[in-house]
Image: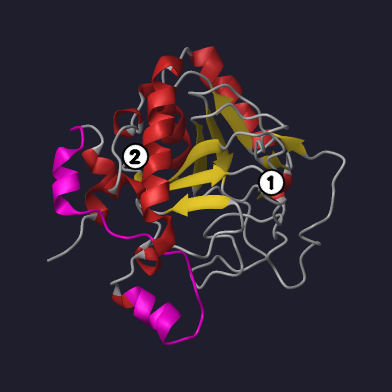
Amino acid sequence: MPPADKQQQLLQMQINGYCILEDIIPQDECAVMRELVSAAVERERSGYPGAPRNVGFVPSLVNHDQSFVEYLAAPRLMGLLGKLLGEHLRISFTSAIINEPANERGKWHADWPFNQNNAGRVLAPYPDALMHITTLWMLSSFREENGGTLVLPGSHRCSTNPTAEDGPDPFERFPAETNASGDPGSVLVMDSRLWHATAPNRSSQPRVALAVRYAPWWLNLEVLRPESDERRRMCDESGRSDNIVPSIRPEVYASLPENVQPLYRHWVARD
Protein backbone atom coordinates (compact mmCIF):
# COMPACT_ATOMS: atom_id res chain seq x y z
CA MET A 1 0.00 0.00 0.00
CA PRO A 2 1.51 3.38 -0.95
CA PRO A 3 2.22 5.52 2.15
CA ALA A 4 -0.45 8.10 1.27
CA ASP A 5 -3.10 5.38 0.92
CA LYS A 6 -2.15 3.80 4.25
CA GLN A 7 -2.36 7.17 5.99
CA GLN A 8 -5.83 7.67 4.52
CA GLN A 9 -6.95 4.26 5.78
CA LEU A 10 -5.55 4.97 9.25
CA LEU A 11 -7.38 8.31 9.30
CA GLN A 12 -10.64 6.60 8.33
CA MET A 13 -10.15 4.07 11.12
CA GLN A 14 -9.56 6.87 13.63
CA ILE A 15 -12.52 9.02 12.56
CA ASN A 16 -15.12 6.54 11.27
CA GLY A 17 -13.98 3.32 12.93
CA TYR A 18 -13.79 1.43 9.64
CA CYS A 19 -12.36 1.44 6.13
CA ILE A 20 -12.57 -0.79 3.06
CA LEU A 21 -9.59 -2.37 1.32
CA GLU A 22 -10.39 -3.27 -2.27
CA ASP A 23 -9.14 -6.25 -4.27
CA ILE A 24 -7.53 -8.18 -1.43
CA ILE A 25 -8.87 -11.31 -3.15
CA PRO A 26 -8.88 -11.25 -6.97
CA GLN A 27 -12.49 -10.92 -8.09
CA ASP A 28 -12.18 -13.84 -10.52
CA GLU A 29 -11.45 -16.17 -7.57
CA CYS A 30 -14.39 -15.07 -5.43
CA ALA A 31 -17.04 -17.12 -7.26
CA VAL A 32 -15.24 -20.40 -6.53
CA MET A 33 -14.62 -19.40 -2.89
CA ARG A 34 -18.25 -18.41 -2.54
CA GLU A 35 -19.35 -21.87 -3.64
CA LEU A 36 -16.86 -23.65 -1.38
CA VAL A 37 -17.71 -21.56 1.68
CA SER A 38 -21.43 -21.98 1.05
CA ALA A 39 -21.00 -25.75 0.76
CA ALA A 40 -19.05 -25.85 4.04
CA VAL A 41 -21.78 -23.88 5.80
CA GLU A 42 -24.44 -26.20 4.44
CA ARG A 43 -22.51 -29.22 5.78
CA GLU A 44 -21.61 -27.79 9.18
CA ARG A 45 -24.27 -25.27 10.20
CA SER A 46 -26.42 -27.79 12.07
CA GLY A 47 -23.67 -28.01 14.69
CA TYR A 48 -24.12 -24.32 15.52
CA PRO A 49 -27.87 -23.69 15.84
CA GLY A 50 -27.66 -20.32 17.63
CA ALA A 51 -27.49 -18.12 14.51
CA PRO A 52 -30.45 -15.86 13.68
CA ARG A 53 -33.08 -17.13 11.25
CA ASN A 54 -31.88 -17.17 7.64
CA VAL A 55 -28.26 -16.56 8.61
CA GLY A 56 -25.73 -19.32 7.94
CA PHE A 57 -22.91 -19.35 10.49
CA VAL A 58 -19.94 -21.66 11.08
CA PRO A 59 -17.04 -20.80 13.44
CA SER A 60 -13.44 -21.87 12.79
CA LEU A 61 -14.30 -22.25 9.13
CA VAL A 62 -10.62 -22.87 8.41
CA ASN A 63 -11.14 -26.41 9.77
CA HIS A 64 -13.66 -27.08 6.99
CA ASP A 65 -12.45 -25.01 4.03
CA GLN A 66 -9.05 -23.50 3.25
CA SER A 67 -9.79 -21.90 -0.13
CA PHE A 68 -9.23 -18.39 1.25
CA VAL A 69 -6.28 -18.87 3.59
CA GLU A 70 -3.50 -17.54 1.37
CA TYR A 71 -5.05 -14.07 1.56
CA LEU A 72 -5.32 -13.86 5.36
CA ALA A 73 -1.80 -12.43 5.49
CA ALA A 74 -2.12 -10.23 2.38
CA PRO A 75 0.60 -7.55 2.54
CA ARG A 76 -1.76 -4.55 2.22
CA LEU A 77 -3.94 -5.88 5.01
CA MET A 78 -1.02 -6.80 7.25
CA GLY A 79 0.53 -3.39 6.69
CA LEU A 80 -2.60 -1.69 8.00
CA LEU A 81 -3.22 -4.14 10.85
CA GLY A 82 0.39 -3.91 11.95
CA LYS A 83 0.00 -0.16 12.40
CA LEU A 84 -3.21 -0.68 14.38
CA LEU A 85 -2.35 -3.72 16.52
CA GLY A 86 1.44 -3.85 16.55
CA GLU A 87 3.72 -6.84 16.03
CA HIS A 88 2.83 -10.50 16.57
CA LEU A 89 -0.87 -10.09 15.86
CA ARG A 90 -3.04 -13.21 15.79
CA ILE A 91 -6.32 -14.40 14.31
CA SER A 92 -9.00 -14.83 16.96
CA PHE A 93 -12.03 -15.83 14.85
CA THR A 94 -12.47 -17.24 11.34
CA SER A 95 -16.20 -17.56 10.71
CA ALA A 96 -18.51 -17.90 7.73
CA ILE A 97 -21.53 -15.61 7.80
CA ILE A 98 -24.15 -15.89 5.07
CA ASN A 99 -27.09 -13.49 4.99
CA GLU A 100 -29.76 -15.49 3.22
CA PRO A 101 -32.76 -13.88 1.48
CA ALA A 102 -35.44 -12.63 3.90
CA ASN A 103 -33.17 -12.53 6.95
CA GLU A 104 -34.13 -9.92 9.53
CA ARG A 105 -32.33 -6.79 10.60
CA GLY A 106 -30.22 -7.51 13.68
CA LYS A 107 -29.43 -5.57 16.83
CA TRP A 108 -26.74 -2.94 17.07
CA HIS A 109 -23.74 -4.36 18.88
CA ALA A 110 -20.00 -4.18 19.22
CA ASP A 111 -17.93 -7.33 18.76
CA TRP A 112 -16.00 -9.33 21.35
CA PRO A 113 -14.48 -8.29 23.74
CA PHE A 114 -16.73 -5.21 23.91
CA ASN A 115 -20.05 -7.07 23.67
CA GLN A 116 -21.38 -6.84 27.22
CA ASN A 117 -23.32 -10.11 26.86
CA ASN A 118 -20.07 -12.10 26.71
CA ALA A 119 -18.33 -13.64 29.70
CA GLY A 120 -15.02 -12.37 28.33
CA ARG A 121 -15.64 -8.64 28.02
CA VAL A 122 -14.08 -5.28 28.70
CA LEU A 123 -16.57 -3.76 31.11
CA ALA A 124 -18.41 -0.65 30.00
CA PRO A 125 -17.59 2.15 30.28
CA TYR A 126 -14.41 0.98 28.56
CA PRO A 127 -11.39 3.08 27.63
CA ASP A 128 -10.96 4.73 24.24
CA ALA A 129 -8.43 2.21 22.97
CA LEU A 130 -8.34 -0.06 19.94
CA MET A 131 -7.89 -3.64 21.18
CA HIS A 132 -9.33 -5.89 18.46
CA ILE A 133 -10.10 -5.70 14.74
CA THR A 134 -13.04 -7.28 12.90
CA THR A 135 -12.70 -7.83 9.15
CA LEU A 136 -15.54 -8.86 6.84
CA TRP A 137 -14.37 -10.44 3.59
CA MET A 138 -16.81 -9.83 0.77
CA LEU A 139 -17.14 -13.00 -1.30
CA SER A 140 -20.39 -11.55 -2.62
CA SER A 141 -20.87 -7.87 -3.35
CA PHE A 142 -22.05 -5.85 -0.35
CA ARG A 143 -24.95 -3.55 -1.19
CA GLU A 144 -27.98 -2.16 0.63
CA GLU A 145 -30.22 -4.53 -1.33
CA ASN A 146 -28.46 -7.73 -0.29
CA GLY A 147 -27.65 -6.89 3.32
CA GLY A 148 -24.31 -5.14 3.32
CA THR A 149 -23.46 -4.81 7.01
CA LEU A 150 -24.96 -1.78 8.75
CA VAL A 151 -22.36 0.42 10.45
CA LEU A 152 -22.64 3.59 12.51
CA PRO A 153 -19.62 5.78 11.72
CA GLY A 154 -17.83 7.20 14.73
CA SER A 155 -19.59 4.98 17.27
CA HIS A 156 -16.30 3.27 18.16
CA ARG A 157 -15.38 6.33 20.23
CA CYS A 158 -18.29 5.77 22.62
CA SER A 159 -17.47 4.19 25.99
CA THR A 160 -20.37 1.74 25.74
CA ASN A 161 -22.60 0.09 23.15
CA PRO A 162 -26.16 -1.20 22.82
CA THR A 163 -25.33 -4.58 24.41
CA ALA A 164 -24.96 -2.90 27.82
CA GLU A 165 -27.95 -2.92 30.18
CA ASP A 166 -27.96 0.87 30.30
CA GLY A 167 -26.93 1.23 26.66
CA PRO A 168 -28.92 2.67 23.75
CA ASP A 169 -31.83 0.83 22.15
CA PRO A 170 -30.28 -1.89 19.96
CA PHE A 171 -33.06 -1.46 17.38
CA GLU A 172 -32.81 2.33 17.09
CA ARG A 173 -32.57 3.78 13.58
CA PHE A 174 -29.84 6.42 13.23
CA PRO A 175 -29.70 9.07 10.47
CA ALA A 176 -25.95 8.41 10.06
CA GLU A 177 -26.20 4.62 9.73
CA THR A 178 -25.05 3.21 6.41
CA ASN A 179 -24.63 -0.09 4.61
CA ALA A 180 -21.00 -1.03 4.02
CA SER A 181 -20.65 -1.48 0.28
CA GLY A 182 -17.98 -3.08 -1.86
CA ASP A 183 -17.24 -5.51 -4.64
CA PRO A 184 -16.28 -9.17 -4.20
CA GLY A 185 -12.71 -9.43 -2.99
CA SER A 186 -12.91 -6.31 -0.81
CA VAL A 187 -12.39 -6.40 2.96
CA LEU A 188 -14.26 -4.24 5.46
CA VAL A 189 -11.88 -3.47 8.34
CA MET A 190 -13.60 -2.36 11.57
CA ASP A 191 -12.50 -1.40 15.05
CA SER A 192 -14.35 -4.09 17.03
CA ARG A 193 -15.90 -1.34 19.17
CA LEU A 194 -17.80 -0.02 16.13
CA TRP A 195 -21.57 -0.41 16.41
CA HIS A 196 -22.81 -2.57 13.56
CA ALA A 197 -25.80 -4.76 12.79
CA THR A 198 -26.95 -7.49 10.44
CA ALA A 199 -28.78 -5.90 7.52
CA PRO A 200 -31.81 -7.49 5.84
CA ASN A 201 -31.15 -9.20 2.52
CA ARG A 202 -33.94 -8.15 0.16
CA SER A 203 -32.37 -9.76 -2.89
CA SER A 204 -32.91 -13.29 -4.19
CA GLN A 205 -29.29 -14.39 -3.63
CA PRO A 206 -27.33 -15.07 -0.43
CA ARG A 207 -24.69 -12.58 0.66
CA VAL A 208 -21.62 -14.64 1.47
CA ALA A 209 -18.86 -13.32 3.74
CA LEU A 210 -16.06 -14.35 6.05
CA ALA A 211 -15.64 -12.72 9.45
CA VAL A 212 -11.96 -12.83 10.40
CA ARG A 213 -10.92 -11.04 13.56
CA TYR A 214 -7.38 -10.08 14.51
CA ALA A 215 -6.02 -9.57 18.02
CA PRO A 216 -2.79 -8.17 19.46
CA TRP A 217 -0.43 -10.59 21.17
CA TRP A 218 -1.47 -9.48 24.65
CA LEU A 219 -5.24 -10.02 24.38
CA ASN A 220 -6.35 -13.16 26.27
CA LEU A 221 -8.46 -15.32 23.92
CA GLU A 222 -8.75 -18.46 26.05
CA VAL A 223 -12.38 -17.93 27.09
CA LEU A 224 -13.25 -18.59 23.43
CA ARG A 225 -11.58 -22.02 23.34
CA PRO A 226 -14.09 -24.79 24.19
CA GLU A 227 -11.61 -26.98 26.08
CA SER A 228 -9.80 -24.26 28.07
CA ASP A 229 -9.79 -23.83 31.83
CA GLU A 230 -10.54 -20.12 31.29
CA ARG A 231 -13.81 -21.07 29.61
CA ARG A 232 -14.75 -23.55 32.35
CA ARG A 233 -14.14 -20.89 35.00
CA MET A 234 -15.71 -17.94 33.19
CA CYS A 235 -18.61 -19.68 31.41
CA ASP A 236 -19.42 -23.15 32.70
CA GLU A 237 -18.96 -22.34 36.39
CA SER A 238 -20.37 -18.80 36.31
CA GLY A 239 -23.42 -19.48 34.15
CA ARG A 240 -22.39 -16.85 31.60
CA SER A 241 -21.88 -17.55 27.90
CA ASP A 242 -19.45 -16.55 25.19
CA ASN A 243 -18.53 -17.26 21.61
CA ILE A 244 -17.14 -20.70 20.81
CA VAL A 245 -14.07 -20.87 18.58
CA PRO A 246 -13.04 -24.51 18.04
CA SER A 247 -9.30 -25.14 17.98
CA ILE A 248 -7.53 -25.66 14.66
CA ARG A 249 -6.83 -29.29 13.87
CA PRO A 250 -3.07 -30.01 13.64
CA GLU A 251 -3.33 -31.37 10.10
CA VAL A 252 -5.12 -28.21 8.97
CA TYR A 253 -2.48 -26.04 10.60
CA ALA A 254 0.28 -28.01 8.87
CA SER A 255 -1.36 -27.35 5.49
CA LEU A 256 -1.49 -23.57 5.91
CA PRO A 257 0.90 -21.29 4.00
CA GLU A 258 4.08 -20.53 5.90
CA ASN A 259 3.22 -16.85 6.30
CA VAL A 260 -0.28 -17.67 7.62
CA GLN A 261 0.75 -20.23 10.24
CA PRO A 262 1.96 -17.58 12.74
CA LEU A 263 -1.57 -16.16 12.78
CA TYR A 264 -2.96 -19.49 14.02
CA ARG A 265 -0.14 -21.18 15.96
CA HIS A 266 -1.70 -20.15 19.31
CA TRP A 267 -4.96 -21.93 18.39
CA VAL A 268 -3.80 -25.39 17.34
CA ALA A 269 -5.59 -28.20 19.20
CA ARG A 270 -3.60 -29.53 22.12
CA ASP A 271 -2.88 -33.18 22.75
Depth check, front residue: 41 or 61: 41
Q: For the C terminus, which image quadrant? A: bottom left
Distance from the alpha carbon under mark 2 to that under mark 1? 41 Å
Label 2 packing within 10 angstroms: few (<14), some (14-19), many (20+): few
Binning the other alpha carbons within 10 Å of mark 1 as few (below 14), some (14 to 19) or many (20 upward) gives some
| Picture layout, residue 85 above or below residue 167 | above
For this view, does 59 lie left or right of residue 255? right
Placement of 234 over or under 8, stated as above or below:
below
- Residue at point 72% right, 47% down? 155
Q: Position of residue 88 (x, y in %)?
A: 31, 43
Does residue 232 belong to the magenta stretch?
A: yes
Magenta segment:
230-258
What amino acid does circle 2 point to?
Answer: Glu
* Secondary structure of the residue carrying numbered label 2: loop
Amino acid type at mark 1? Ala
Residue 2: x percent and y percent? 47, 12
**Quadrant of the image occupied by residue 141:** top right
Q: Is there any visible trace of residue 94 in the rendered image? A: no
Q: Secondary structure at mark 1?
A: loop
Please provide percent x and percent y for residue 224. 39, 65
Location of mark 1 (residue):
102
Q: Residue at x 70, y 41 (%)?
A: 151
Identify residue for label 2: 87
Q: How many marks?
A: 2
